[in-house]
Amino acid sequence: MSNDDQRQARHQRAMEKLKSHVDERVAGASEERGQLLIFTGNGKGKTTAAWGTVTRALGYGYGVGVVQFIKGEWECGERERLQEDPNLQVATMGTGFTWETQNRETDRQACEAVWQDARKMLSDPGVYLVVLDEITYMLKFGYLDIEAVRDALQHRPVEQSVIVTGRNAHRELLAMADTITEMQETRHAFNNGLKARRGLDY
Ligand code: ATP
Ligand code: MG
């Protein structure tokens, strides 16, 4: 057998093994239902990944709801582009950044108002995917109760998936999640003095 033939035979054996392993795993995954995903950690990419999944769902014509806690008044390229899609609804928090407004009571009220929009989405079977962007901070600041969020998530339509983004996700949310991705910061441009960039960071 030539060297090439030997390599081909080895490759084939490895691929057969891989295929049987993958087939087994695929056969083992039989449950179909909406899922809870959490994109957390200090690295960049949480909100980007959420909008990527929004685009994916819209691509099949599914109804999608995005709730932007915190950064409601900020520019957002994905929102600009995707809001033309009648299957997308976006709810944004009325006030700006909490460390800009620095008023707990108005922030709490703004949070409560947008949470009502979120609750509507979380009870609507026509909404296939809901994104709760930066909601982790609302729990951290005490503007939202974990019980209310947990309750809404638990009672959502069976086919509905939810993506939660933000750092320091509450442990009760983590306990409920089907998928948790922790974005790890290996390096971030900001820490070397680079400004956040339109079309890249927002
Ligand atoms: P993105 O929206 O780019 O996916 P993110 O959702 O993971 O980022 P956030 O904590 O929501 O991260 O960050 C909001 C803004 O800060 C974005 O403009 C983002 O690019 C930027 N950013 C993300 N990670 C870091 C970091 N480790 N240091 C500084 N800025 C960051
Ligand atoms: Mg984000």
Image (cartoon, helix red, strand yellow):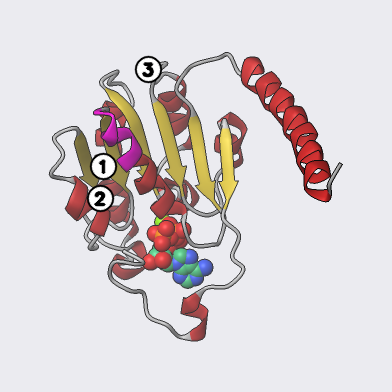
In the picture of the structure, the residue carrying the numbered disc 1 is: 114
Residue found at the far right of this picture: 1
Q: Are marks 1 and 2 in contact (CB under 8 Å)?
A: yes
- Using the image, tell me which numbered label, if any, was put on residue 33: none
- Ligand 2 falls in quadrant: bottom left
Label 1 Cα neighbours within 10 Å, binned few <14 / some 14-19 / many ≥20: some
Q: How many marks?
A: 3
**Quadrant of image for the C terminus:** bottom left
State the residue position of label 3. 157
In the displayed structure, would residue 74 be above or below residue 23?
below
**Residue designated by label 2:** 93
Q: Which residues are magenta?
A: 55-61
**In screen coordinates, is 73 left or right of 156?**
left
Residue at left offset 24%, top offset 59%: 77
Image: 6 above or below 46 = above
Taking depth in this image into account, of 4 and 62 the one nearest to the observer is: 4
> Of marks 3 and 1, which one's residue comes earlier in the chain?
1
Looking at the rendered image, the quarter that the N terminus falls into is top right
Q: Are marks 3 and 1 in contact (CB under 8 Å)?
A: no
Frontmost residue, 143 versus 183: 183
Image coords of residue 176 (percent x, y): 57, 29
Kind of residue at badge 3: Pro
